[in-house]
């Protein structure tokens, strides 16, 4: 489990692709490796990855992670190049303050930056989600104004949503801009999206209570209520 509060910016120093996936080496990461062990989880741009090898001191500290094809398909990490910065966060410790929101670092999908607008010292960013498919339903039902969202692993507050355009927006204060990679990404770049998991559990519970899947369950419930009204009034 993570909080979405980025601890450090690492730099990709090696990318090794093969048929089964990809190995990333992330350097300049010594500040978060003090208590590291092989097998530990570190969120890289919001994706929970397992440390397979590390050195705390060599060249400022580095660690390696393995990306399966599923991770490459779901995230932007397959597009990262040597020299790119990435957001890093260690798994949450039980003894620390909980400052962000519950982040699993299980990326749901990617979105595309469609606008960047300065607002004083702050920066407003707008993102567009891809069209829904049978294998990847829309994330829009889980995205609400003033709700939580994790973008490239950063816990942020949603400022606006436009369902018709499949877009949503956030605002980065100056301090946050300096601490994460998102403020450096250009229009057209992809970002990793993880919606608030509480919304997923609520939807699942409601669907189960309705006795069906999604809209089909709601339709069945409405039909049952209407039928009961008609029967009570002697109309059927």
Image: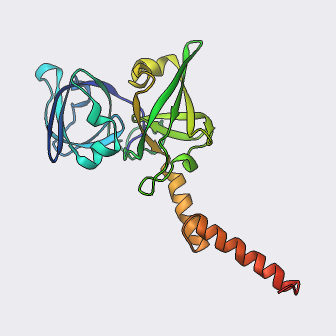
Q: Where in the figure is residue 137, as x and y percent of width and height?
A: 48, 53
Left or right of 26? Residue 228 is: right
State the residue at coordinates (59%, 71%): 209
Quarter where residue 194 is shown: top left
Q: Where in the figure is residue 116, as x and y percent of width and height?
A: 52, 20
Q: Where in the figure is residue 149, as x and y percent of width and height?
A: 50, 39
Quarter where residue 59 is shown: top left
For residue 114, above or below residue 92: above
For residue 140, above or below residue 162: below
Numbered label tally: 0
Q: Where in the figure is residue 26, as x and y percent of width and height?
A: 21, 29
Quarter where residue 10 is shown: top left
Which quarter of the rendering shows the C terminus?
A: bottom right
State the residue at coordinates (23%, 20%): 83
Left or right of 50? Residue 139 is: right
State the residue at coordinates (17%, 20%): 60
For the rendered model, the colour scheme is rainbow
Left or right of 82? Residue 108 is: right
For residue 221, above or below residue 201: below
For residue 236, above or below residue 170: below
Nearer-the-camera pick, 175 or 228: 228
């Amino acid at each position: 489990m993570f909080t979405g509060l980025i601890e450090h910016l690492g730099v990709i120093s090696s990318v090794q692709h093969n048929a089964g996936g990809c190995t990333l080496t992330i350097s300049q990461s010594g500040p978060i490796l003090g208590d590291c062990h092989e097998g530990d989880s570190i969120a890289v741009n919001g994706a929970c990855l397992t440390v397979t090898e590390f050195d705390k001191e060599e060249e400022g500290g580095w660690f390696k992670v393995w990306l399966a094809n599923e991770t490459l398909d779901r995230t932007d990490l397959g597009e990262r190049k040597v020299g790119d910065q990435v957001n890093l966060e260690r798994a949450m410790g039980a003894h620390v303050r909980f400052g962000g929101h519950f982040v699993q670092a299980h990326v749901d999908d990617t979105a595309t930056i469609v606008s960047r607008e300065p607002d004083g010292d702050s920066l407003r960013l707008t993102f567009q989600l891809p069209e829904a498919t049978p294998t990847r339903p829309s994330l829009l039902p889980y995205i609400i104004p003033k709700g939580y969202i994790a973008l490239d692993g950063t816990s942020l507050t949603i400022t606006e949503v436009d369902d018709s355009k499949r877009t949503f927006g956030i605002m980065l204060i100056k301090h946050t801009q300096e601490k994460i990679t998102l403020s450096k990404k250009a229009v057209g770049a992809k970002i990793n999206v993880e919606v608030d998991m509480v919304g997923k559990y609520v939807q699942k519970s409601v669907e189960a209570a309705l006795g069906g899947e999604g809209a089909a369950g709601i339709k069945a419930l409405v039909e049952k209520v209407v039928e009961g009204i008609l029967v009570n009034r002697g109309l059927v």
